[in-house]
Amino acid sequence: DSVFCQIAQAPEDPILGVTVAYNKDPDSSKLNLGVGAYRTEEGKPLVLNVVRQAEQKLVNDPTRIKEYLPIVGLADFNKASAKLIFGADSPAIQEKRVATVQCLSGSGSLRVGGEFLARHYHQKTIYIPDPTWGNHPKIFTFAGLSVKTYRYYDPSTRGLHFKGLLEDLGNAASGSIVLLHACAHNPTGVDPTIDQWEEIRQLVRSKQLLPFFDSAYQGFASGSLEADAKPVRMFAADGGECFTAQSFAKNMGLYGERVGALSIVCKTSDVASRVESQLKLVIRPMYSSPPLHGACIVSTILNDSNLYNEWTIELKGMADRIISMRTQLLEALQAKGTPGDWSHIIKQIGMFTFTGLNAEQVGFMRKEYHVYMTSDGRISMAGLSTKTIPHLANAMHAAVT
Ligand SMILES: Cc1ncc(COP(=O)(O)O)c(CN[C@](O)(C(=O)O)[C@@H](O)C(=O)O)c1O
């Protein structure tokens, strides 16, 4: 008998499992609105032109080697990543108070940050939004932290539960870690306003909470890298300490290259260098050092002004296409007279619309219309195109009437 004959069949991941089911469906009208991966109007994955150009430069460089990266990753990438999120004029960067390590995309950055905190921070509780990305609680639990939630979304308004957020964070034990989505909240698409962010920042600082930003969509929410980084920059510039996990999966279209960075803003440069040394002790026994290729692509683009400018144009193009899908879906539902108020579709931002459809309606749409989305009613707007909007509108109309 196998020593694993008792092992149980694990359930599919709630998000990635949607694509597994979609792939099995033979119906030609099927629509995959599950995983947060950008698709063009033709419904195809997109490799950015600047990524192709950067790869060409790398391939044509005969001096390139395949040596191990250091444990902390590619230095030019780390510097450029920190600059991208904190701003070129960031006081924290100028005073060398930021420890940045290249990690395996956003997930890896969150996990390394969680493991570091479990090992070196006195408070082991992390507050995450309700709802949040399904992988957050698992990442931080396995890292050794205890996970609690703070109210974030108000189903009655389909907007931010700001009062609940302030109350829950106000009641958190001093020093607790607080996970914050930097922009384009997943799954709700609801972000605090800048004024609300300032109130959150004041509360966080007054209670000595430790902010941990998750930035997986910088540039995707508004189309502007600067605007989308504003909340993070408010915290990073106030002299306090904060964690930031960055992913280049979506905004550079580098999903499978697993490119990300964890940056820890510290009070002094001496602390930052000691923090970096301890981060190496977390990373070395986990995966030893990060992958070379994706970091070289990002570093090439961020460190070349022409490629950088072209990237900002392509990024805005993706964000604009998603926004046009929002407008078209709302118009299609209004044209059909679909019961309910669907204005949240254009109020929410980023890759996802939190429709408000329940699990039963989601199941109905999958069964009857071959529309695939997560059971919490989230749809990835990037999975839509002008020609598939009518099919989704028909499915939603049928699901609610
Ligand atoms: C808020 C948030 N943080 C981190 C990540 C991790 O991303 P990566 O490790 O690839 O850099 C995602 C991706 N979440 C998804 O877009 C999604 O929610 O569909 C999808 O990629 C996923 O893995 O679930 C995310 O939505």
Image: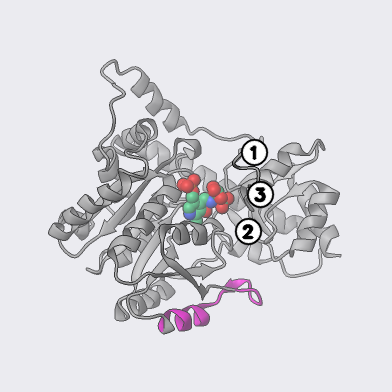
Comes first in the chain, label 3 or label 1: 3
- In percent of width and height, residue 101 lies at 29, 47
Which residue is denoted by mark 2 in the rendering? 353
Q: Position of residue 314 (x, y in %)?
A: 47, 39
Label 2 Cα crowd, 10 Å radius (few <14 / some 14-19 / many 20+): many
Query: Alpha-carbon neighbours of circle 1 within 10 Å: few (<14), some, or many (≥20)?
Result: some
Residue picked out by circle 1:
41
| Residue 258 forms part of the magenta stretch | no
The CA distance from mark 2 to mark 1 is 18 Å
- Location of the N terminus by quadrant is top right
Return the x and y of residue 178 as percentages of the image width and height.
Answer: 40, 69
Quarter where residue 363 is shown = bottom right
Question: In the figure, 340 relative to 68: above or below?
Answer: below
Which residue extends farthest left? 270
Q: Image point 83% across, 48% down: which residue?
A: 369
The amino acid on which the numbered mark 2 sits, given as a three-letter code, is Thr
Above or below, comparing residue 142 to residue 76 in the picture: below
Q: Amino acid at mark 3?
A: Ala
Residue placed most toward the observer, 71 or 102 = 71
Kindly identify which numbered label has been placed on residue 250. Answer: none
Residue 309: image quadrant is top left
Inspect this view and state whether residue 384 appears.
no
> Mark 3 to mark 1: distance in Å?
41 Å
Q: Which mark is residue 8?
A: 3
Residue 310, position as x, y percentages in the image:
40, 36
Q: Which residues are magenta?
A: 154-170
Instruction: From the image, state whether disc 3 or disc 2 is nearer to you.
Output: 3
Hey, what amino acid is under mark 1?
Glu
Whether residue 31 is visible, yes or no, is yes
Depth check: give the residue in front, 112 or 377: 112
Q: Are marks 3 and 2 in contact (CB under 8 Å)?
A: no
